[in-house]
């Protein structure tokens, strides 16, 4: 018997054991909400990842459309298509080195004129069928040591030189221009002079 409480100590011990056991038994129950919250964290992370993936999928058509527009713009020909090439006339006056056409397409070059028919059609392109007065225009040819060549590597199989040309005897290369004295003849001059230009680049059907 416990003199303070008047109860049998064995019973007190049993009650203490039950209280302790009860407290210990409740500890896992108290941790369940924590475990439950921890268990949901990966699920929330999965939802976030799914949401990000969905947003990326929604953005892909926009990127695809933008890429398509760029490709279409690059392939648009604002001049005339002749034998699978786009020929464009640029009326802006530029030196030969600044007239290299790469703003039109990555593989654009100043034109090489390899036959009479192409020459005639390019004259018409520049003058818009004779409506406009011709202007001095860079072609894609240079002359070095009295030897003419096309900068795009085309074979030099045709020419329409102005009488007395090419007659450039400087130590540096000279550049080929068209429409000297309002004619479609070609002549060679200093490449630093500023002229209009004719550009060409391949196009696909």
Image: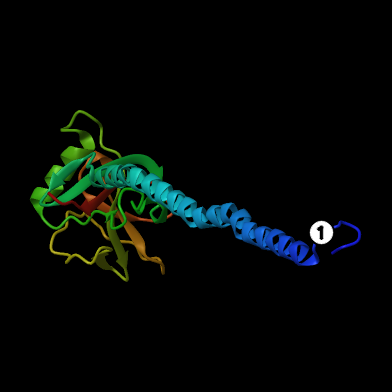
User: Crowding at label 1, few (<14), some or many (≥20) Cα neighbours within 10 Å?
Assistant: few
For residue 6, side relative to residue 46 (left or right): right
Residue 164 position by quadrant: bottom left
From this viewpoint, is residue 194 visible?
no
Position of 42 relative to 74 (above/below): below
For residue 161, side relative to residue 188 (left or right): left
Q: Nearer the viewer, residue 42 or 23?
A: 23
Q: Nearer the viewer, residue 170 or 195?
A: 195
Q: Quadrant of the N terminus?
A: bottom right
At 16% from the left and 38% from the top, the residue drawn is 124
* Colour style of the rendered protein structure: rainbow
Position of 65 relative to 151 (above/below): above
Q: Nearer the viewer, residue 69 or 166?
A: 69
Residue under numbered circle 1: 7
> Which residue sits furthest top?
131
The kind of secondary structure element at disc 1 is: loop
Residue 64 position in % (x across, y down) = 30, 46
Total numbered circles:
1
Residue 134 position in % (x across, y down) = 26, 37
Residue 54 position in % (x across, y down) = 37, 46
Residue 200 position in % (x across, y down) = 23, 51
From this viewpoint, is residue 12 visible?
yes
For residue 48, side relative to residue 76 (left or right): right
> Which residue sits furthest right?
4
At 10% from the left and 51% from the top, the residue drawn is 83
At 28% from the left and 54% from the top, the residue drawn is 110
């Amino acid at each position: 018997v416990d003199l303070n409480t008047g109860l049998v100590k064995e019973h007190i011990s049993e009650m203490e054991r039950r209280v302790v056991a009860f407290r210990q038994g409740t500890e896992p129950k108290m941790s369940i909400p924590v475990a439950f919250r921890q268990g949901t964290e990966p699920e929330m992370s999965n939802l976030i990842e799914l949401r990000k993936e969905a947003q990326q999928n929604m953005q892909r058509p926009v990127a695809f459309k933008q890429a398509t527009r760029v490709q279409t713009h690059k392939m648009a020909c604002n001049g005339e298509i002749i034998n699978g090439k786009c020929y464009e006339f640029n009326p802006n006056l530029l030196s030969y080195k600044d007239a290299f056409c790469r703003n039109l397409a990555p593989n654009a070059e100043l034109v090489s004129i390899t036959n009479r028919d192409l020459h005639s059609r390019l004259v018409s392109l520049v003058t818009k069928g004779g409506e406009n007065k011709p202007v001095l225009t860079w072609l894609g040819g240079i002359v070095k040591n009295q030897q003419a060549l096309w900068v795009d590597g085309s074979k030099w199989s045709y020419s329409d030189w102005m009488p007395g040309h090419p007659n450039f005897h400087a130590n540096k290369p000279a550049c080929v221009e068209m429409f000297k004295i309002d004619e479609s003849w070609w002549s060679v001059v200093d490449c630093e002079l500023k002229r209009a230009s004719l550009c060409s680049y391949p196009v696909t059907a």
